Image: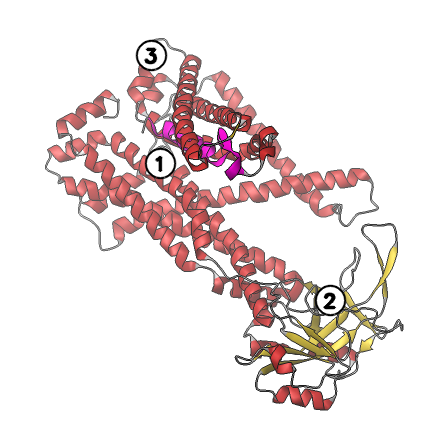
Amino acid sequence: MRWVPTGIAGLLSALSAYATVPLYSVIATSGDPFLLGGIWVWLNMLFYAPLILAVAVGTVAVFRALWVATRRAELSAQLALGGTRRALIRGHAAAGLRDGCLGWGIGTAVGGAARQLHEGVGEGFWMADAVYAWLFTLALVVMALAGAYAVVAAWATRGSVADVASGASVMTGPGIPDRTPMDPVVARRTRRRTWMWTAVGVLLLCASAVSFILPGPNTANDDPAWRWIVSFAAGTIVGAVVIGVVPAALGYLGARLARAVSVTALRTVGGTPAPWTARALAAESIGRPMPLRLATLVTIIMVMGLSSALTVGYAGNEARNELSGELEVDASVASVDLFEGDITAAATGGWAPGLPADVLAGLHADPALTVIEAGVLVTDTRTVDDPYEDREYAARDVLLAAHSTAIDSLVPHATTALELGAGTEWTWGDPGVTGGFGDGPTFVEAGGVRRDTAAANSAPPWTGIERGWAESVWGDSPTAAVLLFPAGSVSVADALESHDLTGLHTMQFEGDARHEGAVDGGLVATITAPFLLVAVAIVVGMAWASQRMRAGDSATLLALGARPGSLRAAAVLEAAFPTFFASLFGVLGGAAVGLVIEVVNRSAVTGFGGGLAGAAFTASVMPWSVFVALVLGATALAGAGAALVRVRLDRLTPAAQLREAQKAGLS
């Protein structure tokens, strides 16, 4: 455990060195000598530095804290012998500098060599960018380890020497040893911090009220600048709370619940276990105070929750794109040009003239074609402000009006998933055309009759409206267009050659797919797995620290006749149960949050019922099997790692384990 932070620094440095340009670049394979004078490599790294630094510091700090928590005797002895807390923290920070340089040196050598082998050797140039990137990585690694070591040292030495020796400084959860009464000066500082955070909370509440009272810049174009600034600042603060504080609070509650459920399951499922059995020992251990246990579970919940919440949006979009792709028209036949908004010089719009009856009958009778009939509504001319120039222009829409039942007969549930229902305008689809609406809401106006609409932008297959709703407003419509799809192996283009379409507007769209894709569970796993592996590694580290801190108890149990297998099984259960429930709660909680957001967003277009239906569709296409595999995989890895830790400890005799615990001050 002592060298895990160094290993993390080495891994980060190796990946960075391999991902950047090689030290010696061969023109034949690089192909771009301009890189010689470029600085973009390390500028890009500078852009991502805060994220990389936050992840690195957090991960390193956790593993360092787990190791330091088992060094009570060493820390308390340094303080008892006259060493100051400040000097101890400086010493740990210096150790972080040393470990960072060591990890960087090894990692950069390995990664740089691998990158150079991949590049090859030949006629080329030395690349200064490689050196810049390496030095930038060195700065990141050194800052991460030195900062993490210093923070952990301050955390582990809070309070008096007695607090450090008893473990009260690092324990979390019920049963924490009593700490020494706080010094009056320290108490005043604590009160000041409490008041400061109270003031921050009041500021956040005020910002929330302001963000609702004042309009934002998008809706207050004529308001004074100060209102823009205040509204934007308030919205930013509220957004930070929603994005940061709320998920953290949910993660904390989920971690507490995972711990409680784990203990309950171990103690009750299958009957009350007998004392000193694996289940009883694991339940007792999980219930004990342990450094960073809740923080570790929060990490797992946040990783799984964020992944499932983001997957809600990803899965919904990809599934809707796939549905829309199935509805993409192979060809259309219409009585008017579906791409020309200025069909007639008249400003008043209405239903376009219908197709000849014999043409409609012939197309329906063709076994090679699937036909969806549509009316064509040409809207009145409207004046729109040009967003790019100081001028106005005339715009009108050409909307295909198809019945939702006809759409669903071709692709089931498409109207619900794509929001192609009554009262929505399917904007930016193809064929059909819509002009701009400026800053105002969307609407349809034809023949002087206007209806406000909601813009359905969920990958619509064509620009249009629902025919039944449109006919209830603008009267019955003739079939002015047909949307054609293949019904067999014969292409639509070949099938149309046998029809007389003279004088009509025919458009071919074959081979021009605009909406593709399906939900890729492998992508979800690829993105989630590395972060989940880090969380599981922390669980294994926690198992190591737990076994070390309970070494005295374990040695006593072994000396009294307890079986090593029971202790190994207890270690597995102690790691596996909280990991399983934390991962499960993270998946379910993240999905619930994502689906609630989807209901809110879609309710603005289709109403609350439509929002629920859209969320239900998204839930049906989520890659649940991937998340089940991730949860089970994390649980198995955590249990296996804990078993390995216990096996290593079992190599020592009970007496040797007890001596090790006494030397570390853990008995």
**In the rendered view, does 414 fall on the left or right side of 500?**
left
Point 13% across, 40% down: residue: 563
Point 75% across, 47% down: residue: 215
Q: Are marks 2 and 3 in contact (CB under 8 Å)?
A: no
Query: Can you identify the residue that label 2 sits on?
Result: 453
Instruction: Decide which of tag 1 and tag 2 comes sooner along the chain.
Output: 1
From this viewpoint, is residue 15 visible?
A: no
Q: Quadrant of residue 456?
A: bottom right
Quadrant containing the N terminus in the rendered view: top left
Three-letter amino acid code of the residue under disc 1: Pro
Query: Can you identify the residue that label 3 sits on?
Result: 80
Query: Can you identify the residue that label 1 sits on?
Result: 174
Point 78% across, 82% down: residue: 503
Span highlighted in magenta in the image = 3-30
**In the rendered view, does 608 fall on the left or right side of 54?**
right
For the residues labelled 1 and 2, the Cα–Cα distance comes to 57 Å
Point 70% across, 71% down: residue: 464
Indicate whether residue 463 is drawn in magenta: no
Instruction: Decide which of tag 1 and tag 3 comes sooner along the chain.
Output: 3
Secondary structure character of the magenta stretch overall: helix
From this viewpoint, is residue 148 visible?
A: yes
Q: Quadrant of residue 318?
A: bottom right
